[in-house]
Image (cartoon, rainbow, N blue to C red):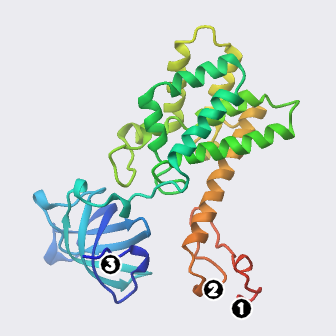
Amino acid sequence: MKKQMIKDLRVGDEVETQAIVLEMNRTVFSSPHRAGEYFLKLTLGDVSGRVKAVMWDPPSGEEAVLQDDVVFVRGSVSDYHGPQIVVGDMRKLDPLKVNRAFFQQIAERDQAEMVAELKTVIAGVVQDKHLKTLLEAFFSDSEFARRFALSPAARTIHHNCVGGLLEHTLEVVAVCRNLATLYPQQIQTDLLLTGAILHDIGKIEEYRQDSISFDFTARGKLVGHISIGKEMLDQKLADLPDFPLALKLELEHMILSHHGMREWGSPEVPKTIHAFALFHADLISARMNQFVKIMQRHVPESGAWTDWARFLERSIFISLANGQDEQGN
């Protein structure tokens, strides 16, 4: 059976396709005659997008569906504050027998090319012997390097694909290299690039490697990648007794402050020029990736503006880039 892609579903369509359960909530019926029973509110997805769904009589027992399951769905698309699949039948599929390409996006850049670029930065750009030794201590560990190359940078917001962490890291490195050329007297390039390479290392433990939807690990939910990353840094530095204390303190601060604000998850705000530069390089990589993904999903026939982007808190005007005039003609 041909796979129906989520982005192609329209109100009134009949649905028979595979999807992954991204979110699932059991909701108790308010009707007295169904007291004690529940229905499912779901978010289903594939590489093309996501859609709300509801199932009034869900399977139970061994057939019960859980978040991150790949399922076969049969139903129809209704309109309930936007498209919603009313699911009549849903059953779990063996994740080892489904085509993961339908559910897991892959970084647009070639993985081998990205790995080679990162190695070049470590070997040929970072000159400080202590910082180079630290980076080599991480990436000479084959298991660490493998997980770093395969991990996503996020579950949904940006670079949420296989290889996304590596792709995002290289973008942050590129922005930091440019910032360092603008402020050569104030920025120590080797230090800034080392922080850029290591700032998100905790994400290899934040997301489950076996999860098709890049679900969080328990430690990822409870501790978070920032604290995990600092722990990983401290563990490596414990094996490097000659590592300068001043560099250690700068790197710890860069990891702990790279989200920029406490309300965005940083235990500290950036208080050094290196931490401040890293925060903005990290932010611009994430935000530009969000913009690009929204623009790629936009259907030109729908007009000059994209749909409202919740994380960016705006719609994006793209008609001029498509050669249209200011009225969208």
Residue at the disc numbered 3: 85
Image x and y of residue 140, in percent? 50, 24
- Quarter of the image for residue 314 reads bottom right
Q: Which numbered disc flags the more N-terminal residue, 2 or 1?
A: 2
Q: How far apart are marks 3 and 1 (CA)?
A: 33 Å
Q: Which mark is residue 329?
A: 1
- Judging by the rendered image, the residue that carries numbered circle 2 is 303
Q: Which of marks 2 and 3 is in front?
A: 2
| Quadrant assignment for the C terminus | bottom right
Quadrant in which residue 91 is drawn: bottom left
Q: Which of marks 2 and 3 is nearer the N terminus?
A: 3
Q: Which of 328 and 98 is in front in this view?
A: 98
The amino acid type found where label 2 is placed reads Gly
Q: Residue 163 carries which label?
A: none
Q: Which amino acid does label 3 sit on?
A: Ile
Q: In the depicted view, which residue is nearer to us: 160 or 227?
A: 160
